[in-house]
Amino acid sequence: MYYGMMGYYMDPTWILVIIGAVLSLAASAKVNSTFRKYSKVRSMTGMTGAEAAKRLLNSQGIYDVQVRPVRGQLTDHYDPRTKTVNLSETVYDSTSVAAIGVAAHECGHAMQDNVGYTPLRIRGAIVPVANIGSQAAFPLIILGVIVGGLGSPLVNLGLILFSLAVIFQLVTLPVEFNASKRAVTLLGQVGILGDQEVGHTKKVLGAAALTYVAALAASVLQLLRLVILFGGGRRNND
């Protein structure tokens, strides 16, 4: 196989990258459209995302987690380091079922942290390694090919580091699905949303979950491509 500059662009394995990109774009479009649809549906209680989050946390005896606004759209996240549920501008003050669903999902992460949910701990432990892996994998692979060819230890190290980033995506799935499950269950139990509204929330969180599935699929496809191109240590560059 030819590994010159043009070879990379003409290589048929690019189809794997394209498939991953299409999946990610489709998932992103789905979550945005679903959120927009149900952001127009006001909750019967009239609670804001921030109020719903505080009520959910208190219902579980969690009083050391702050709920605060952050800039951006769908930038919502829970930070275990600062014990904060951070809600975006379109969620914090909104009374829509979509906003309450997103806020509840982030509270789900706070609940996981509170009970020591194992997948969340595992994900937190591998975050530094996964970040390094995603950033250093490609430079190491390219440098390894230039210096020592496909059999270079640097190439193998790059593939291992990228694999760790894929593992992070894999561990993320149960964390996100469990947080949504906790959120949907409690929203009805605590009386923040009615049955029909909970159904709307399931659709919003279900669409959001697709983004994590798509991210994992894209990462796996990228890893497969790298293994095909660089994983054959017995090959050479002629």
Image (tube, rainbow, N blue to C red):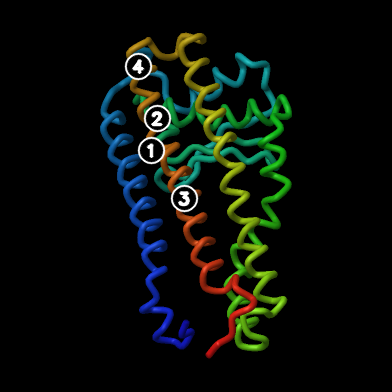
Mark 3 lies on residue: 217
Q: Nearer the viewer, mark 2 or mark 3?
A: 3
Q: CA distance from mark 4 to mark 2?
A: 12 Å
Mark 4 lies on residue: 197
- Disc marking residue 90: 1
Q: What amino acid type should be assigned to the residue bearing mark 2?
A: Ala
Q: What amino acid type should be assigned to the residue bearing mark 1?
A: Thr
Depicted 143 relative to depicted 103: above or below? below
Asked if disc 2 and disc 3 are in contact, CB closer than 8 Å, the reply is no
Which sits earlier in the primary sequence, circle 1 or circle 2? 1
Q: Among all residues in the image, which is located at the extreme front? A: 234
Q: Regarding mark 1 in the picture, which secondary structure is present there?
A: helix
| Residue positioned 72% across, 24% down in the render | 115
Q: Nearer the viewer, mark 4 or mark 3?
A: 3
Q: CA distance from mark 1 to mark 2?
A: 7 Å
Number of residues whose C-alpha sits closer than 10 Å to that of mark 1, classed few (under 14), some (14–19) or many (20 or more): many
Give the image location of residue 105, x and y in percent: 51, 29
Which sits earlier in the primary sequence, circle 1 or circle 3? 1
Q: CA distance from mark 2 to mark 3?
A: 27 Å
Q: Nearer the viewer, mark 4 or mark 2?
A: 4
Could you say which quadrant of the image residue 35 lies in?
Answer: top left
Which sits earlier in the primary sequence, circle 4 or circle 2? 2
- Disc marking residue 99: 2
